[in-house]
Every structure is written in structure tokens, then in C-alpha cells.
Amino acid sequence: GPAKGKYKVYIIDEVHMLTQEAFNALLKTLEEPPEFVKFIFATTAPHKVLPTILSRCQRFDFRRIPALEIAEQLKRIAASEKAAVDKEVLFAIAKASDGALRDAESVLDQLISFSKGRVSLKDVVSLLGIVDQDTLFEITDKIIQKDAAAALRVLNAVVDNGKDIQVFLSSLIEHFRNLMVAKVSRGDAKL
């Protein structure tokens, strides 16, 4: 039985990684669990969990938190910490956290503790290894102008500054997507 409290809770993270044999062993316990036992299965791939397991579970789907909501929460935290943080800094952190509030809060915490006074966008770019917007706009302009040599110079500067080329390419694809959405949506911030 539980040492303290009413239940003994077992959390199995990334449950889809269990082998067939492990699932089968678990199934026996799930069919008739002791009253005081609660299982929590977490997974990023629910389609890989056996239907026999899924049928015995209550399912809760968690969504990623939109960047605007994360930025708002970060703004509240910065205000409570009396830290000077620009709006674009909050949004850059929120975007980089990819919907995970805990990650965003952790980054903000690091930036506040490392920076003396004001947290700048340069600090975020440096800490997260992300590519700044100016560089993305610069290479986009060169591509629009069909100036391959200049685009390659921008790319070379990115690599020389120690940025991961995969991160840069992902950022550039997202930048193109954002430009396309901005053009189509005519300024709807939710999109």
C-alpha cells in the first residue's frame, strides 16, 4: 500500500517505448489494478500504444501553449521580478520554447540571472543559439533579389558565427511560413 496518502501513483513517461512483452505484463495489472494504485501514462505518440491498453485508459490530450500566451506569462514573471525585458525578447523566448511554458520560464530565469539590468534580444540569441530576425530578413531579401552570391555570404556569416545550420534552415523555413501567413491573414495576430 501507499506509504502516505490514499494512492500509490506510478508515472510511465514515453509509454509507447515499452516492448510488446512489457505491455502484456502491464495489461494484467491494468485489468485488475489494486484499489490504491493509479497509473499515469505519458506519451508523445499515442498511436503507438496498443489498443488494448488505450481501451483501459482515460485519455487527456495536452496542447502546446500558443506563443502569445507564453509571452504574456513571461511578461507577468518579468514584472514580478522587476526585470527590464523588452517585448521582442519575451516573444523570442516564447517562440523558441515551442509551446512549453516550463522551458520558456527556465530560459527567462537564466537570462534574468545572467544579464545585468536589461535583457536584450542579443542575450536570447546567444543563449538559445537561435538566428536573429534581421539575418532571416536579410537572406530573404537576397533570395527575392535573386542574388545568390549575397545570400551565400549571409549563410557563410551564420556558419562563421557558430550557428547550427539545421537550426538556421528550420528558422528560415518558419520565417517563410510566417511571411506567407502574414500576407494571407492581413495581420491576424492569432495566425
Image: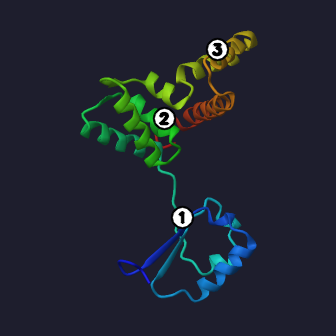
Q: Is residue 145 visible?
A: no
The mark nearer the N terminus, 2 or 3, is 3
Distance, label 2 to label 3, CA atoms, is 31 Å
- Asked which secondary structure carries label 1, the reply is loop
Distance, label 1 to label 3, CA atoms, is 42 Å
Q: Residues within 10 Å of mark 2 (few under 14, many from 20)?
A: few
Q: Residue at x 57, y 63 (%)?
A: 13
Distance, label 2 to label 1, CA atoms, is 30 Å
Q: Is residue 88 visible?
A: yes
Identify which residue, 48 or 180, lies in the foreground: 48
Figure quadrant of residue 22: bottom right
Question: Could you tell whether 75 is left or right of 102 in the image?
Answer: left
The mark nearer the N terminus, 1 or 3, is 1
Q: Residue at x 62, y 24 (%)?
A: 163
Mark 1 and mark 3 in contact? Answer it, CB < 8 Å: no
Q: Which amino acid lies under the numbered mark 2 shown in the image of this protein? A: Gly
Residue 157 numbered mark, or none:
3
**Image x and y of residue 178, in percent:** 58, 34
Question: Could you tell whether 54 is left or right of 80 in the image?
Answer: right
**Image x and y of residue 5, in percent:** 35, 78
Q: Which amino acid lies under the numbered mark 3 shown in the image of this protein? A: Ala
Q: Residue at x 51, y 56 (%)?
A: 63
Residue 187 numbered mark, or none:
2
**Image x and y of residue 124, in percent:** 46, 28
Question: Label 1 belongs to which residue?
Answer: 61
Q: How many marks?
A: 3
